[in-house]
Amino acid sequence: MTAAERLSGDEVVQLLDDPSYFDLLELPTPANRDGILKALQDDRLVQPSEAGGWDITNLGAILIARRLSEFESLRRKAVRVIQYSGVDRTVTLREQIGSMGYANGYSGLVGFINALLPTNEVIEQAIRNSVPMFPELAVRELVANAFIHQDFFLSGTGPMVEIFVDRIEITNPGEPLVDTQRFLDSPPRSRNETLASLMRRFGICEERGSGIDKVVFEVELYQLPAPLFEVSSGFTRAVLFAHKSLSDMDKAEKVRACYLHTCLRHVTRKSTTNSSVRHRFGIEEQNAATASRILSETLDAEMIVVRDPSAGTRSRAYMPFWAQS
């Protein structure tokens, strides 16, 4: 599929951000235009036109367009960033539509998002510092995932980032090819493997299969509520939540956090225990019964199972429901 046809070499380099392409790949820029076009052709970003000149492929335009608005078929695929004043969509503070391709505009996009995110103030050694409310690595990975896993056949809509005072929601068109409960352990399946491969080469997304692991790890490191992955009306949404104390979390949030904690432990070949759950939620050792209650609720929800049912209660270890033989 082509985004623009029968262009001269000069028109191609006017429409595509070839300097960013070579910078992202950490390659020297060829000395002449023919070398540039050859490199872009090798990665299927452009192709010779049957009518003469060059065609820019959809892949080339979506990744390194200087201005996506120049490509009629892809302008609605630009990412939208919307900031709201509260916890709902009643009052919009700011809305920005990305103008560049996903790859050459990625760094600026993530910087723009992080600048809008709320921060928390902490005092360390008598110095007051502002720290981001959400882990930057998690935001980066989820934005890249929204690009890679979207359904390009759903016209008129593209990725969207919505920022609320208590959460950030990252949505892409299309339903996932993997069950949301298995995001952490299943090898990713993408409708857009060529795009995903180039995004990995550009250093924009993580190696295959490690991205959601890192999201969950970062969320646990920040001791935030577990991320939520959901499918609604043909769209996939990932939600990161601001910090909540354990007492403010409802049962569903605790169960989801315990389940994802168990998944993360399992894929790193570790078992979930009362001790690891205490560490996940910041529970003091003398309150081990609280961790036991969370484990029991997650067992009742059939999200985890006991690894060895014959083990005593104190020494029990747990694994995700899908890991049992």
Image (cartoon, rainbow, N blue to C red):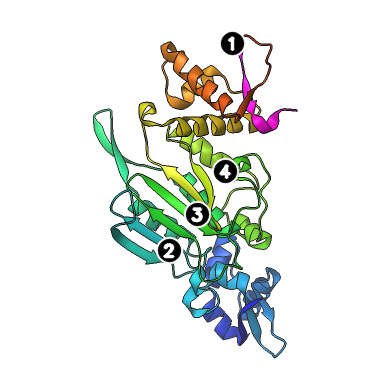
CA gap between label 2 and label 1 equals 50 Å
Count of numbered marks: 4
Query: Are there few (<14), some (14-19), or many (20+) residues within 10 Å of tag 3?
Result: many
- The quarter of the image holding the N terminus is bottom right
**Which residue is identified by label 1?**
313
Secondary-structure class at tag 3? helix
Q: Within the magenta stretch, is there residue 315?
A: yes
Query: Residue 40 sits in which quadrant?
Result: bottom right
Secondary-structure class at tag 4? helix
Q: Residue at x 60, y 57 (%)?
A: 149
- Asked if the residue under mark 3 is in contact with the one under mark 1, i.e. CB atoms within 8 Å, the reply is no
- The amino acid type, in three-letter code, at marker 4 is Ile
- The amino acid type, in three-letter code, at marker 2 is Arg
Determine if residue 191 is in view. Answer: yes
Q: Which residues are magenta?
A: 313-325
Secondary-structure class at tag 2? strand
Query: Are there few (<14), some (14-19), or many (20+) residues within 10 Å of tag 4?
Result: many
Residue 225 position, x and y percent, is 44, 35
Q: Please tell me which residue lies in front, 164 or 20.
A: 164
CA gap between label 4 and label 2 equals 22 Å
CA gap between label 3 and label 4 equals 12 Å
Q: Earlier in the sequence, mark 3 or mark 4?
A: 3
Which mark is on residue 212? 4
**Which residue is identified by label 3?**
143
Residue 166 position, x and y percent, is 35, 44
